[in-house]
Image (tube, helix red, strand yellow):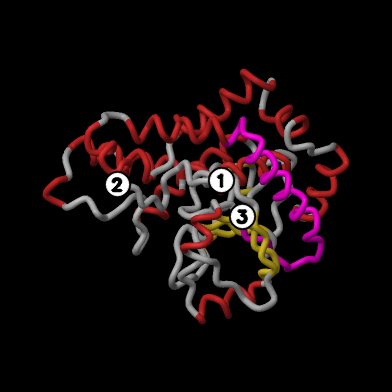
Amino acid sequence: MYFVLIGVLFSRFYRIKGENKAMMPEKLQIENGFNFRELGGYQTTDGRRLKKHKLIRSAALSTLSKRDLTYLDEYGLRYDIDFRSPSERQKQPDRLPAQTTYNFAPVFTVDETKSQTDDREEDNRLLTERNAGFKQMLDAYNDIVLSANAKKAYRKFFDLLLANERDNESVIFHCSAGKDRTGMGAVYVLTVLGVDQETIRADYLISNEFLKKRRGFKPVSDRVPLQAQNATYSENMRALSCVSEKYLDCALGTMQREYGDLGHYLETELGITKQQKKELQQIYLED
């Protein structure tokens, strides 16, 4: 079933519109990182495309090699936006090219997605409570939408996107796994730029394909001995380690219930004006 789902997701990027073919997200050639991808190439509903070398989404940057740093410098990386919590940043600080400016925009004060938790009580809950991981993720997505801290972080995100005016200079935005906080950031910016919701949803879900190939990423503590792990633990691990349409639908449903819809949320809660939307499209879309 998993591979069927991934096949469906990939097929969404190959819809034929006349002679135009929607483009796949480009996986960047990073040695010691994962879920790195270029958002340039996506097509908007009015037929324009996102510029390349402008928007990159990823997971953590703490393990990048010297070759990776050189690659990103030559790629034009100039702004880094870190959505992680203070404790995540302290444990695994970003490695960046010399020309890249670091910007801290924590969506949560603690990591509610449990991407890098180190908590024995949490480990025990994952072993004993069915659906604990799933419930934790729904709570996290609700907080991404509702919390003042998250709104402040994503407003800062858009301010930095507006500052990235030069061609071939890129912004990278990331969290620990590059799937939830980063995923919602991508939903927001792709919506403002005019990409259709089907493509946005597929971009969000394709993180599962990238994360499947991750190296060295542990979404929860590794202190639970293998022999102690059970079916409940495995179920909760899967919930914490992936993205799901149910998570995205939870966030969008909360927006609709509390604010009207995604577009209204971006305007009223993140403060994206019509003029700023126009400026962002001028910066990030091809003529």
Q: Which of 16 and 120 is in front in this view?
A: 120
| Disc 3 from disc 2: Cα separation | 37 Å
Residue 153: within the magenta? yes
Query: Which mark is drawn over residue 109?
Result: 1
Mark found first going from the N terminus, 1 or 2: 1
Span colored in magenta = 144-173
- N-term-proximal mark, 1 vs 3: 3
The residue depicted at 59 percent of the width and 52 percent of the height is 83
Q: Of circles 1 and 3, which is in front?
A: 1
Magenta stretch: includes residue 119: no
Instruction: Tell me where residue 1 appears, x and y as whole percent.
Output: 29, 37
Tag 1's secondary structure? loop
Callout 3: helix, strand or loop?
loop
Q: Hey, which quadrant is residue 46 in on the image? A: top right
Q: Distance between the residues labelled 1 and 2?
A: 19 Å
**Residue 243 picture location, percent across and down:** 43, 41
Q: How far apart are marks 1 and 3 (CA)?
A: 27 Å
Of callouts 3 and 2, which one flags the residue occurring earlier in the amino acid sequence?
Answer: 3
Amino acid type, label 3: Leu
Say which residue label 2 marks: 120
Instruction: Identify the residue at the far left of this view.
Output: 227
Q: What's the residue type where badge 1 is placed? A: Thr
**Is residue 112 toward the left or the right of residue 46 in the image?**
left
Q: To which residue does mark 3 refer?
A: 39
